[in-house]
Image (tube, rainbow, N blue to C red):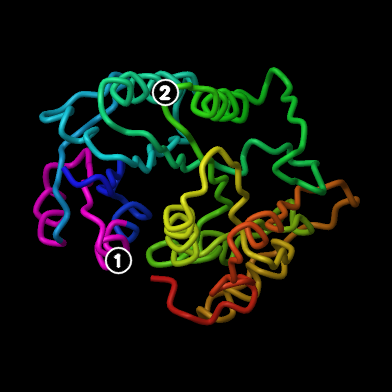
Amino acid sequence: MPARAISILGCGWLGLPLAKHLLALGYPVLGSTTSAEKIPVIENCGIRPFLLEAAPRLKGEELSAFFNSSLLFLNIPFERQLEDPAFYKKQVVSVIEHIHQGRVEFVIFAGSTTVYPETLENAVEEAALHHPAGNARARVLLEVEQLLLSDPKFKTTVVRFGGLYGPGRPIGRFLAGKKGLSGGDRPVNLIHQQDCVRVVSEIIGHDVRGEIFNAVGDGHPTRKALYTAAAKRAGLEPPEFVREPRRPCKVVRNDKLKKRLDFVFWHPDPLNFSGPHE
């Protein structure tokens, strides 16, 4: 296997376009899916396909071959409907065990800005994070980050992605026409699929290891402004939000990403996004 081969654990909404992008840059790419129906789709793109599932133990054929790459993009979705968020941590622990048995020396972890409290108005990577007992999802995500970053057998860079939009994930369409919604004055922290792909690609290209990056666009319009505008653009009835007292709200900062990688967003502000969402 070439030294620069890249394995993508999770060739879904983000992983598949990333794989195609990396292929175009000349990297050999291995990609996994949990769906047998997607194997031909992945293979037809020029990606070496693997049928793998973490349930929570990682299982599938040719596991050793999948972890024979030098770099792994770890992209297991943290399903919101999980009854026990600790299940996600068990999934990642199983992946780490296979990393130890393979040749992976660099992991890029698709994390989330969920680790930041909803009241943190200046959410920067260096912020000290302490979660109440009730916020199990954020706590587990932070524990997973720390597991990966502290492992002595490989280097990890964590990308804390904001809310994702782009093809198949239109902004706010599910809120169109709804009444009496709360949180209208909360700012959003979003990133377009194309910028997600470019962020990961730049980390690989610059070989930036052992870092944490927030990956969100520059613009933070309120939910009311964004979802109202999105509904009007789509010809749908705008949602209606109730008035609420002003509270501290999470605003995720992307200064480190832009400075460290000299990164310029293609889609800096979701409020001004006029391209196709689907």
Q: Is 68 rendered above or below residue 185?
A: above
Using the rendered view, name the quadrant where residue 149 is placed.
top right
Q: Is 98 rendered above or below residue 3?
A: above
Q: Give the structural element (helix, strand or loop) at label 1.
A: loop
Q: Is 47 rendered above or below residue 144?
A: below
Residue in the image at 74% along x and 30% along y: 129
Residue in the image at 26% along x and 68% along y: 24
- Residue segment shown in magenta: 19-45
For the residues labelled 2 and 1, the Cα–Cα distance comes to 27 Å
Does label 2 or label 1 sit earlier along the sequence? 1
Magenta-span inclusion, residue 30 = yes
- Viewer-nearest residue: 170 or 253: 253
- Viewer-nearest residue: 95 or 177: 95
| In the displayed structure image, the side of residue 266 where residue 28 appears, left or right | left
Residue in the image at 11% along x and 30% along y: 62
- Rendered location of residue 253, percent (x, y): 72, 54
Q: How crowded is mark 1: few (under 14 residues within 10 Å), some or many (20 or more)?
A: few
Q: Residues within 10 Å of mark 2 (few under 14, many from 20)?
A: some
- Viewer-nearest residue: 136 or 42: 42
Amino acid found under the numbered disc labelled 2: Lys
Q: Residue 153 carries which label?
A: 2
Determine which residue is flagged by label 1.
Answer: 25
Q: Is 232 rendered above or below residue 54?
A: below
| In the displayed structure image, the side of residue 111 where residue 44 appears, left or right | left
Magenta-span inclusion, residue 43 = yes
Residue in the image at 79% along x and 58% along y: 185
> Count the marks: how many?
2
- Rendered location of residue 266, percent (x, y): 54, 74
| In the displayed structure image, the side of residue 127 where residue 269 appears, left or right | left
Amino acid found under the numbered disc labelled 1: Leu
Using the rendered view, name the quadrant where residue 227 is placed.
bottom right
- The quadrant of the image that shows the C terminus is bottom left
